[in-house]
Image: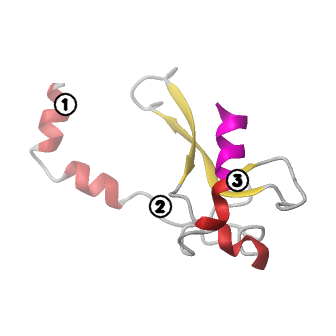
Amino acid sequence: MVVLEEKLNTDAIAAEYESILKKRHQADCRVALRPENGKRNRFPNYLPYEDTRVRLLATSTNPHGYINASHVQVGLCMYISTLCYCYSDTGTCSNGSIDAVCAFLWTTA
């Protein structure tokens, strides 16, 4: 706790946040950019990368099993070598993504 308090009293946390990579420039978002998936992207500038996106089972209304969601792995390896968390992250629902969000919750719960 002392380390956290020390860092809060400096600009270290803000500097660390600013150092986080905001976008992988060579990353592929091809399924997210397909015209039929536009309605599933509430915010067109927040798209999942192909290698980290959540893949739902394909259906007749969602043939690519697409949802605007990503698997996120958070590790505290620099502090505690065995502590690692895995999450799935999705934004807020758009009118075109209600079915996909329900499938997402059902398959990842």
Q: Which of marks 2 and 3 is in front?
A: 3
Q: Do the residues labelled 2 and 3 touch (CB within 8 Å)?
A: no
Residue 100 numbered mark, or none:
3
Could you tell which of marks 1 and 3 lies nearer the N-terminus? 1
Q: Residue type at mark 1?
A: Val
The range drawn in magenta is 99-109
Q: Nearer the viewer, mark 1 or mark 3?
A: 3
Q: Relative to the observer, which residue lies in front, 3 or 35? A: 35
Give the quarter of the image for residue 7. Answer: top left
* Residue receiving disc 1: 3
Q: In this view, does 50 lie to the left or right of 88?
A: right
Q: Residues within 10 Å of mark 2 (few under 14, many from 20)?
A: few
Task: Tell me the SS state at disc 2.
Answer: loop
Q: Predominant secondary structure in magenta?
A: helix
Tell me the residue at 52%/20% (across/down): 82
Picture quarter with the C terminus: top right
Q: In this view, does 20 lie to the left or right of 44?
A: left
Tell me the residue at 54%/67% (across/down): 46
Q: Is residue 85 above or below residue 100?
A: above
Question: Residue 56: where, in percent of width, then height?
Answer: 78, 48
Could you tell which of marks 1 and 2 lies nearer the N-terminus? 1
Q: Residue type at mark 3?
A: Ala
